[in-house]
Amino acid sequence: MEPFDLFSMRESYNRQQIMLCFNGPISRSLIEEIGNALRNYLAADHAHPSSAMDVFGVYIELTQNIRHYAQQKGWTETDASATVVVARNDAGHYVVSAGNIIEQADGEALLACIDELAGLDKAALKARYKEQLRKPREAEAASGAGLGLIDIARKSSAPLQGSLRQLTDGRAFVSLRAEI
């Protein structure tokens, strides 16, 4: 095993203003514990209450989506792992980023949705949210890339960004970035 250079990691995290970073299998209890830590970090950072709520809400939505997706696929803990980072950018905005392994086709559909939402202004996002709320849900339909993603886009101060890195066996690693 390669030795860790924790000091270099720390310096890198400090330069990138990373407040919280997680990589590994994600359970409901872990989502909750990291959420509690995030709330404490935001309080210590004197985040505006509405910003803190938005950052927390985006974190919860992203991590729960990752967990639900992996459960839906029946994947192992390793395949169900997530990478989550909460940081500040140079403009002082919070940036919530999350990534996970996904079926290539699902990732492409998700990126198409992200690209579509990124082109909408706040009024159009609000209208899309209301439209999605009114749509009837089929009982057997899998959830995903719907209301929660629109809500993340609405909370973001900049267009959502997403990327897909192709892996093997028809899978890819999807990354989503929301700035608040």
Image (spheres, rainbow, N blue to C red):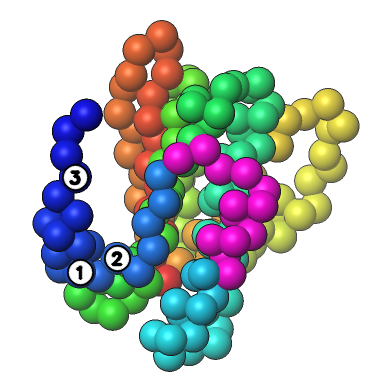
Q: Which residue is mark 1?
A: 14
User: Where in the figure is residue 47, as x and y percent of width and height?
Assistant: 44, 86
Q: Does the segment drawn in magenta span residue 34?
A: yes
Q: Secondary structure at mark 1?
A: helix
Distance, label 2 to label 1, CA atoms, is: 6 Å
What segment is highlighted magenta in the picture? 24-36
Give the numbered dot on residue 77. Answer: none
Residue at 28%, 80% in the rendered image? 92
Q: Amino acid at mark 3?
A: Phe
Name the residue nearer the viewer: 146 or 28: 28
Q: Amino acid at mark 2?
A: Ile
Distance, label 3 to label 1, CA atoms, is: 17 Å
Q: Quadrant of the C terminus?
A: bottom left
User: Where in the figure is residue 156, as x and y percent of width and height?
Assistant: 45, 67
Q: Amino acid at mark 1?
A: Asn
Residue at 49%, 27% in the rendered image? 78
Name the residue nearer the viewer: 80 or 112: 80
Q: Which residue is mark 2?
A: 18
Using the rendered image of the protein, determine whether residue 114 is visible from the camera's viewpoint: yes
Left or right, 163 with respect to 156, comes to left
Name which quarter of the figure residue 159 lies in.
bottom left
Q: Which residue is mark 3?
A: 4
Residue at 59%, 22% in the rendered image? 75
- The mark nearer the N terminus, 2 or 3, is 3
Predominant SS of the magenta segment? helix
User: Where in the figure is residue 68, as x and y percent of width and height?
Assistant: 66, 37
Q: Are marks 2 and 1 in contact (CB under 8 Å)?
A: yes
Q: Quadrant of the N terminus?
A: top left
Q: Secondary structure at mark 3?
A: loop
Q: Secondary structure at mark 2?
A: strand
